Image (tube, rainbow, N blue to C red):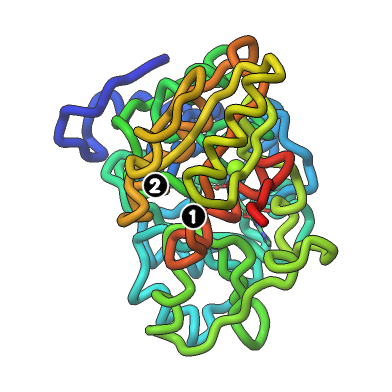
Amino acid sequence: KYWNVEETHIDKNDTHIIEAAELLKRQEVVAFPTETVYGLGADATNEQAVQRIFSAKGRPADNPLIVHLANKHQIQEVVEDIPAVAHQLIDHFLPGPLTLILKSNGACAGNVTAGLSTVAIRIPDHPVAKAVLEACDLPLAAPSANRSGKPSPTTAQHVYDDLQERIAGILDGGPTGVGVESTVLDCSGDIPVILRPGGVTKQDLEAVIGEVAVDGALQNEQEKPKSPGMKYTHYAPEAPLWLIEGDVDFFRDQIQTLKQAGNKVGVIASTELAPSLSADWVETCGSRQDLRQVAEQLYNALRAFHPEEMDVILCETFPKEGVGEAIMNRLTKAATQKVTQT
Ligand code: TXA
Ligand code: MG
C-alpha cells in the first residue's frame, strides 16, 4: 500500500493514517516519515512484528531499535526510571531529533533491545509520524527504512526503491527536513554520552545540561563502539566512495588522474565547489555556509549514483562543527578511503 499524505493537513483521523494504523495493529510493518529520515515501524511490544522489521531490512539481530512514542507521558511506560538529566533533555528537545538511552522496564519485546538492559526512545517531530503513533496507540520500534548498509531514506521513493516488496505500506509525507538521523545519547550512566552524532548537536546539548561525553569509538576507530549499530558499514553508495580533503585544485587533480586511468568519476560537492569540478556526473549537496542544508541533501546525493554508472565517487569533506559532526561521521563510515592533500 502506498498512501500520499504530503499535501493534506494530517491527523490521527485521516483515512490513510487509520488504514496504516490498522496494519500496524495487525503486526505488519509500515514506513512513515519523521523529521530526520523515514522510519520502518512495527509494534514494539510484539516480538513477531519486530522480527518483520529485521527481515525486511536484512538487519543483524544484535543491532537494537529505537522505540518511537507519541508523547512524553508514554516514556515512563517503557523505561525503569527517568533520571533528572533526562527530564531536562525531554523538556528542551522532545519532540525532536534526539534519542535517549534509558534503563528498560521490559515492556518492549526482547528483540527491540537486542537483549540489552537499556532501551532507546524518541518522540519524532513530524505530523505524519505523530498521527500514526496516536492512531495505533502503540510504541513503534522503527529503524531507518532502508535495506541494511544503504544510506537512510529521506524520501518515500528511497523507501520504495529499497523495500517495496518486503513491507505492508509506505506513507509518503514528502522529503524529510533534517536529513541525518537523530543524535543517540546514552543517559543510563552517570554522565550522558553521545553514541551517534545527529540532528541535535553537542553544543545544543551542552547549553542545556552542561558537559556531555562522546563515545571513544567516534574519535578512535580502534575502540569498540557502545552503540551496536555504529560498528557496521553504513550509508554506502553503490560505488566506492573517496573523501577528498584539500583545495579545489587538489580535487580537480584527483578527478583528472582517475579519468585518465579510464574511470567513470562521480562527484558529490557543495554549491561553492561543484561549478569548478568537471566529472562524468556532479551531484550537489547544499552550501558549505549552511551545513544544515548539506545534512538535508546528503543521503539523496549518496543515492543518486547507480552501480553500473560510476567506477568511483569523490566527495568533498566538511568542517566537523555543529551538524558537521554527523555529516562527517556518516561520510567516514560510507567511504572506502580518504585522500588528503599534503
Ligand atoms: O532519526 C532516527 O533516529 C531514525 C528515525 C527513523 O527515527 N532512526 C534510526 O534508527 O536511525 P536506526 O535503527 O537506523 O539506528 C538506531 C541506532 C543504532 O545505531 C542502534 O545501535 C542504536 O541506535 N541503539 C538502539 N538501541 C540502543 C541501546 N539500547 N543502546 C545503545 N544503542 C542503541
Ligand atoms: Mg539506520
Q: Which amino acid is tagged 2?
A: Val
Q: Position of residue 86 (x, y in %)?
A: 49, 79
Residue 306, quarter of picture: top right
Q: Position of residue 274 (x, y in %)?
A: 39, 35
Distance from label 1 to label 2 (Cα)?
Answer: 9 Å
Q: Nearer the viewer, residue 321 or 95?
A: 321
Can the viewer see residue 126? yes
Number of the label disc, if any, that sits on residue 294: 2
Circle 1 residue: 318
At mark 1, the secondary structure is: loop
Tell me the quadrant of ligand 2.
top right
Do callouts 1 and 2 mark residues in contact (Cβ within 8 Å)? yes
Disc with the residue nearer the chain's start (1 vs 2)? 2
Q: Position of residue 31 (x, y in %)?
A: 46, 30
Residue at (37%, 49%) from the top-left corner? 178
Residue at (45%, 40%) from the top-left corner? 298
Q: Position of residue 129 (x, y in %)?
A: 36, 42
Quadrant where the C terminus lies?
Answer: bottom right
Left/right placement of residue 239 relative to residue 184 reads: right
In this rendering, which labeled residue sits more in front, label 1 or label 2? Answer: 1
Residue at (47%, 45%) from the top-left corner? 248
